[in-house]
Amino acid sequence: DAGVIQSPRHEVTEMGQEVTLRCKPISGHNSLFWYRQTMMRGLELLIYFNNNVPIDDSGMPEDRFSAKMPNASFSTLKIQPSEPRDSAVYFCASVRGTEAFFGQGTRLTVV
Amino acid sequence: SQQGEEDPQALSIQEGENATMNCSYKTSINNLQWYRQNSGRGLVHLILIRSNEREKHSGRLRVTLDTSKKSSSLLITASRAADTASYFCATDEGRKLIWGLGTSLAVNP
């Protein structure tokens, strides 16, 4: 198994542009989580899905952020429009039981 | 929201020494997990301890849990340079994991 796959690994974009982050969870894992990590705030849960259904999106910072999981093997996190304060590393994790398996993350820089 | 709080925030030791990190949490838990994050990488699961367990071992790792004090410790024995990483504790809240800010461990050769 290749593990959780995220793309792109790095993204540099200009303020105001739309950014789409992608995640392919591990097959058979029925929960998927999106996190944002910064030095100041640590690891923040943005949203999580169970069986492709969004369960808790209370961590999504504002309406500029949206996430979808159209099927069990793919999820996207979209930021539109992006702002410099969105710069962070975004992680996707799929969960089997209680154990989380993280992707390598997408380092987003908004200039 | 952050429930777990690790301390120290940063720890620097020599290779061969033991490293101890602590985690405190606020609410009742079913289990507590420790993860490691190497620089620029995702988090990797190390060990899980259930609320009815007091101590657990895995290789050079030893985890203790004191539910009365709402705290856990992670001990890495005979540390190696490759143990240099950030270590996070995570507690369960329903299906969610609640994360601390981590302890940054540097093991000097």
Image (cartoon, helix red, strand yellow):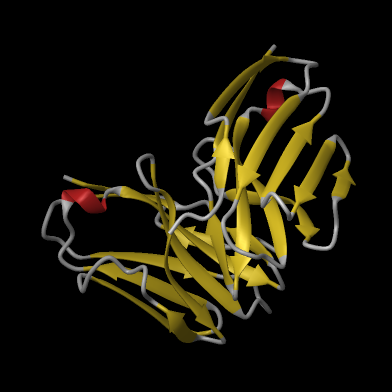
Residue B103 x %, y %: 57, 35
* Residue A103 seen anywhere in this rendered image of the structure: no
| Left or right, B84 with reference to B50 | left
User: Which quadrant of the rendered structure holds the N terminus of chain B?
Assistant: bottom left
Which quarter of the rendering shows the C terminus of chain B?
A: top right
Q: Name which quarter of the figure residue A100 lies in.
A: bottom right
Which residue corresponds to the image point at 21% horizontal and 74% vertical from the top-left? A63
Residue B42 picture location, percent across and down: 55, 49
Give the vertical position of B60 relative to A41 (above or below): above
Q: Residue at x 83, y 40 (%)?
A: B62
Q: Is residue B77 left or right of residue B27?
A: right
For residue B83, what is the image quadrant? top right
At horizontal 49% and vertical 39% (from top left) the residue drawn is B40
Nearer-the-camera pick, B75 or A102: B75
The image quarter containing residue B64 is top right
Horizontally, is A73 left or right of B58 in the view? left
Foreground of the two, B95 or B36: B95
- Residue visible at 44% across and 60% down in the picture: A35
Considering only vertical position in the picture, is A95 above or below A13?
Answer: below
